[in-house]
Amino acid sequence: MKNAAFRAHTNIALIKYWGKEDETLFIPMNSSLSLTLNELYTDTFVSRLDEGAKDSFILNNHEQSEEETKKISKFLDLFRKEAGISSAFRVESINHVPTAAGLASSASAFAALAGAMNQVTGLQMDPQKLSTYARRGSGSSTRSLFGGFVEWQKGTSSEDSMAIPIDPADWDIGMVIVAVNKTAKKISSRLGMKQTVETSPFYPAWVSSAKDDLIAIKEAIHEHDFKRLGEITEHSAMKMHGSMLGAKRPIIYFEPDSMKAIQTVKKLREEGLLCYVTMDAGPNVKVLCRLSEAEKIKQKLLEDFTEEQVLISGPGPGIRPLTD
Ligand code: 2P0
């Protein structure tokens, strides 16, 4: 095959991934669990080039630097090696992220590229195995192979550190995303996790409590217990940020507007609405809620934020080929 195109949706972790056991193979310290989102996704087109050509990478219609292309080439090497081929590829990606959201994610990017490479090379790996390949591009992209609630089992080796779909999340689950700040983050997740693992005295507690949280959240999902799901989600995010605050030097992703959104969610909860915050390696706040109540939550957030800063999403599907 000469060309292939795939779509992958981004995901937000409810039990966070923070820290690597193996930095080269992207094996995490703890298993994690996420929700795939319908509204944020990446479309990636790959074409095999003629002998002698070099890899090229175009993102949102802009040719990327040699340095960025090198990262992609390293990822493509995994597929070239498995397929026993040496050809170069042209990779073109479009991030479908609403204006000003600032939520472009490596999770959907590497998942879409893994899907396209799996097809164009004729490897036809099953999604589980393919998730171990996506992982080598970016840890969180492992989980974007599937839709709904997805677990990334840390495993014991590169071959079994993979994603498993847990539940389609088709029981009135949604997220309200508050784009607090769209500028690029100051400390990359990769660096942030490394610094936390190496210097935070709270890190071992993070790892052991993430294990318990994972068991508990899977029970909550199984029982469709939304309140418990939300409580575990918020607690996991705050514990992850707590471990970062204990790093030397401290890693602080909170901004005044993040706190504003968190306070609003707290107030809504006091008024009886079930909604819970989570935050990643940046100041944006994501609110886990009932999809049927997302609009009400959005309206409340609009008292402090603009229309283009607040986005509602339901659960999204796993990767799929684009045929038209
Ligand atoms: C997560 N994050 O579980 C966590 C929570 C951010 C905070 O996965 O180094 O881009 O490429 O494996 O996957 C973001 O980190 O990091 C991330 P690498 P990645 O979603």
Image (cartoon, rainbow, N blue to C red):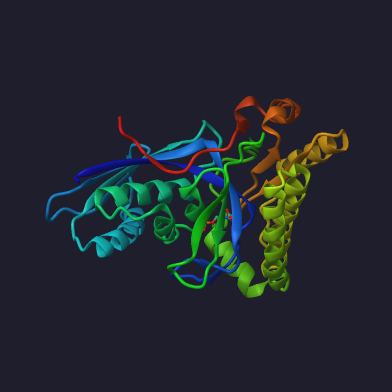
Q: Nearer the viewer, residue 324 or 110?
A: 324
* Residue 217 image position (x, y, % from top left): 70, 54
Q: Quadrant of residue 79?
A: bottom left
Q: Residue at x 31, y 33 (%)?
A: 323
Judge whether 74 appears above or below 204 on screen: above
Q: Position of residue 166 (x, y in %)?
A: 58, 50
Q: Locate residue 121, reporting x and y percent.
A: 24, 53
Measuring 68% from the left and 48% from the top, which residue is drawn there? 221
Relative side of 90 to 51, left or right: right
Q: Does residue 46 appear in the picture of this structure?
A: yes
On the picture, is 190 further left or further right than 132?
right
Q: Tell whether 256 sits left or right of 43.
A: right
Tell me the quadrant of ligand 1.
bottom right
* Relative to 67, residue 279 above or below: above
In the rendered view, tell whether residue 178 sits above or below residue 139. above
Q: Residue furthest left?
A: 51
Query: Can residue 255 be seen?
Result: no
Residue at point 29%, 62% (across, down): 77
